[in-house]
Image (cartoon, rainbow, N blue to C red):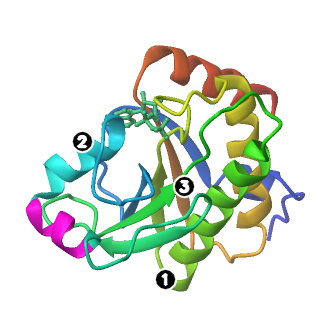
Amino acid sequence: MIVLPFNRREKNRIQVVKGDLTKMKVEAIVNAANPSLLGGSGVDGAIHRAAGEELLRECQTLGGCKTGQAKITKGYLLPAKYVIHTVGPIWQGGQNNEAELLEVCYANSIKLAAENNIKTLAFPAISTGAYGYPLKEATAIAFKTITNRLFFYPDDILQKVYLVCFDRLTYQCYLDFWKYY
Ligand code: ADP
């Protein structure tokens, strides 16, 4: 048996991909939602459009979601069986707990995925679109939090976590980070 050092084992479970989250054939995708959970712009809108109206109906029963929290629904017409909705922080200059809140978004999403025995999970770059979080700082938080949290779960629960980059800039930033991580 090859025992990989801490971080290598977790890093091997993460994969950076360029593409559309709504097309991912994984057990669960994470939605960068807003507190109403009733849909919005960016990836949130794309998920609701692809999943169909039943997703909105289930979301209406959830009573919203606070920043940093995560809630799970079915995926309906999506290839993914589940959607984990989390609300990232709005960037306000960095002095309003933004980093901690973004970290708990990733941590709570992973926790909820593990509780539901999800083996394959895909994240968007939470908060880096309409919510304005600086890309490099957000990327560092995504990698750090995901590797740290995966350490606590055996490989057979969360086998693979995909980081899905929609645009070239995000993809390049994630790849650069991945190389030196
Ligand atoms: P937030 O409000 O949390 O900033 P956005 O949806 O505005 O969320 O942006 C978060 C990231 O999701 C951005 O990098 C944006 O380019 C990306 N994104 C938008 N649509 C998709 C999609 N269909 N698949 C994957 N990522 C997407």
The 10 Å Cα crowd at callout 1, few under 14, some 14 to 19, many 20 or more, is few
Residue 161: numbered disc: 3
Q: Residues within 10 Å of mark 2 (few under 14, many from 20)?
A: some
The residue pinned by badge 2 equals 46
Front position among marks 2 and 3: 2
Q: Residue at x 62, y 58 (%)?
A: 105
Q: Which mark is residue 43?
A: none
> Taking 17 as reference, is 45 left or right?
left
Q: Amino acid at mark 2?
A: Ala
Could you say whether the residue bearing mark 3 is in a helix, strand or loop? strand
Quadrant of the picture in which ligand 1 is shown: top left
Which label's residue is closer to the chain start, 1 or 2? 2
Residue that mark 1 sits on: 117
Sequence order check, earlier mark of 1 and 3: 1
Q: Which x, y percent locates residue 58?
A: 23, 75
Q: Residue furthest right?
A: 5
Location of residue 111 in the rendering, given as x and y in whole percent from the top left corner: 62, 74
Q: Is residue 82 above or below residue 7?
A: below
Between disc 1 and disc 2, the foreground one is 2
Question: Which segment is the magenta one?
Answer: 53-58
Mark 2 or mark 3, earlier in chain: 2
Q: CA distance from mark 1 to mark 3?
A: 13 Å
The relative height of residue 3 versus residue 39 in the rendered view (above or below) is below
Q: Amino acid at mark 3?
A: Val
Frontmost residue, 101 versus 124: 101
Q: Residue at x 45, y 72 (%)?
A: 71
User: Disc 2, disc 3: CB below 8 Å?
Assistant: no
